[in-house]
Amino acid sequence: MIIRDEEVYPFFQKIIKQKLLNIVFQPIVSLETGELFANEALTRGPQNSFFSSPLNLFNYAEKTGHLYTLEKITRELAIERSNQISENNSKLFININARVIEDPCFTPGNTISFLKRNGISPTDIVFEITERSAITDFDKFTSVLEHYRSQGFLIAIDDAGAGYSSLQAISELEPDFIKIDRSLITNINNNRIKASLVEAFTYFANKSDTKIIAEGIETKEELDFLVNLGVNYGQGYYIARPKTEKQEISQNIKQSCIILRQKQVIEGRQHFVQPTDIIVVKKNHTIFGTYRADLPLI
Ligand SMILES: [Ca+2]
Ligand SMILES: [Ca+2]
């Protein structure tokens, strides 16, 4: 379906009103066992339309002042539909724009009563926050987040290393999970800088109460490398694609994780960077980060 410019807004309104949205779920697995740990809910607009791209959909909503409404609808649809795909207390990761969290209308009470009606506990919900809309007031943002945490919700920093998610967000928000952006994962098995950086994140996670999730794993080599680095969780097309229905994690994935981890334990290998290592990464000609692994990230 091709939509002409003058038809875009009415079509967008129709999407919101009739909730013409597809929610797909992409598994996140434990790299220790290969078992399902969580699903990330992803939103797609109607197929073959301008809004089938989530980027177009959410950008348009933000431009026209409907971001809060769109996010509320997608959050509720994700929670409702997650019942059909989740298992064994697996968690549900929900993407949420930093601006929406700061919106006074966004109260945990609303989400909690909705969760209750669907038989889900707030401790099973992880809000993925990306800094695409930069957080300007960390003090305010941290206190808002504390409010949600006190209700049991967990927090993930999304797209870490991608440019929008800064090290400041990680150090100030003290997330439960850090999702490492695919740009640092792609071809990590052949790239020493990427490997050192992900290793540093893993070292940091071991020192703090944070777990690392590697995103965008697309090959067996990348998966094996990340298991060897001691990364906690993984997600990507090689493990499982986003789907509307419940998915089983393949035996191949489970075996890779278990065998490699056992080998690590037997060999007693130490993978973490040395505390005095200094890591400097240039990305698009700018310095991404430089710090000592034994000092807090700044
Ligand atoms: Ca995400
Ligand atoms: Ca991401």
Image (spheres, rainbow, N blue to C red):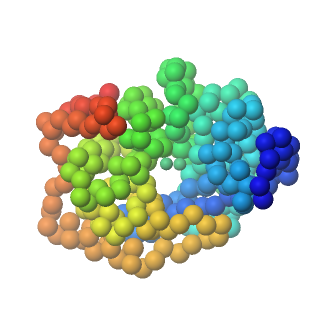
Q: Quick one: 59 or 116, which is closer to the camera?
A: 59
Quadrant in the rendering for residue 98: top right
Quadrant in the rendering for residue 31: bottom left
Q: How many marks?
A: 0
Q: Quadrant of the C terminus?
A: top left
Write the residue at 15% across / 60% down. 269
Write the residue at 60% across / 61% down. 25
Estimate the x, y position of residue 86 in percent, counting from the top left: 61, 65
Estimate the x, y position of residue 278 in percent, counting from the top left: 17, 35
Write the residue at 45% across / 60% down. 235
Estimate the x, y position of residue 127 in percent, counting from the top left: 56, 44
Write the residue at 20% across / 66% down. 264
Up-down relation of residue 281 to residue 222 (above or below): above
Quadrant in the rendering for residue 20: bottom right
Q: Is residue 173 visible?
A: yes
Estimate the x, y position of residue 151 in percent, counting from the top left: 61, 39
Q: Quadrant of the N terminus?
A: bottom right
Q: Quick one: 218 or 166, which is closer to the camera?
A: 218
Name the outermost residue toward the bottom.
251
